Amino acid sequence: MLPQLPASKANAAPCESVADWWPRHRAIADDHADPIHQAIIGGFVADRVGWAFASGYQAALRALFPDAPADRICALCVTEADGNSPKAIKSSLKQNGDGWILNGAKRWTTLGPEGGLFFVAARDEAASGERVSIRIARVDSKIEGLKIEKMPATKFVPEVPHARLQFENLKVKDAEILPGDGYDQYVKPFRTVEDIHVQAAVLSYLMREGQRLSWPQHWLERLSALLAALGKIADMPAAHAETHIALAGALAIGAGLIGETEAFWLNSATDPATLRWHRDRELLQVAGKARELRTRRAWEKLTTP
């Protein structure tokens, strides 16, 4: 599913807010069941990196949580004041009769102020010992005991809002606790799934800009090949070392292609898209160390006798 349009039709409709972007993404999701297609098409119709990222993020969540409702903005809530490792997660779940009680706080919840459903990582107090046991709870944004506070805009992709969440004796039904180890089955794989879908969305955004601004054909051809490769990587198991190594290669190729665009953007220095790109490109550097560690561990796993 590679979007190809003549340059004359490659303009994206202006989009200034989540309220503008979400119906557009919903329509794409309705037409394309495969999350990687949602990411690629969502990126192609985006008028800026922020909305490409938002579509890639929502698509990644649907890949990880296939039962997530299509009509609601969702978010995975992991990061707290001390970070996002199991030991840094202090939010807690305690069994209470036939349900659970959730307490704690999260920060940097993507699209949190607009979110309808949160997948919250919290420690299972009864099961945690020397090793922290993490569970994932589905939390409705309108439930009693949840406070949502909008965070200041980031310096890049400022259109995409983030939120702090506060849980105060919030009641969670047993059916809303996802089965299995929350960290190994959801949090860790999501880092890989998100990288695949967000990278595909942002590169697809650049595909449209490249067509609109008449960037070199040979560059568009290589980008098409990379998008096709990401589509295949999206079908690989997110926890496998082979997937991590293939993704590392795709990200490296993508970084090279993106680097080449710096010269292309110079030809449209006053175009609003150029100015936004220079503001937003830092997004692609987020979590770089985590990606390096993931790749190193993947190679160690494959090469250790």
Image (cartoon, grey):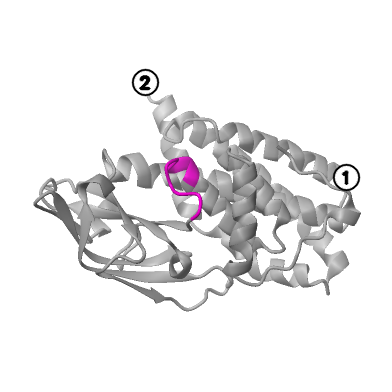
Q: Amino acid at mark 1?
A: Gln
Residue 305, numbered circle: 2
Mark 2 and mark 1 in contact? Answer it, CB < 8 Å. Answer: no
Residue 54 % position (x, y): 57, 58
Q: Secondary structure at mark 1?
A: helix
Q: Does residue 248 show up magenta in the picture?
A: no
Q: Is 239 placed above or below 70 here?
A: above
Q: Mark 2 Cα within 10 Å, few/some/many (few <14, many 20+)?
A: few
Q: In the image, which residues are magenta?
A: 62-71
Residue 291 % position (x, y): 48, 47
Residue for point 76% across, 68% down: 273
Closest to the observer, 38 or 203: 38
What's the CA distance linking mark 2 and mark 1? 45 Å
Q: What residue is disc 1 on?
A: 217
Residue 212 % position (x, y): 85, 57
Residue 281 % position (x, y): 64, 63
Q: Quadrant of the N terminus?
A: top right
Looking at the image, residue 261 sits to the left or right of residue 115; the answer is right
Q: Amino acid at mark 2?
A: Pro
Looking at the image, residue 218 sits to the left or right of residue 115; the answer is right
Q: Does residue 68 show up magenta in the picture?
A: yes
Looking at the image, residue 180 sits to the left or right of residue 196; the answer is left
The mark lying in front, picked from 2 and 1, is 1
Q: Quadrant of the C terminus?
A: top left
Closest to the observer, 184 or 75: 75
Q: Residue furthest top?
A: 305
Q: Is 40 placed above or below 156 here?
A: above
Viewer can see residue 50: no
Q: Earlier in the sequence, mark 2 or mark 1?
A: 1
Residue for point 29% across, 43% down: 178
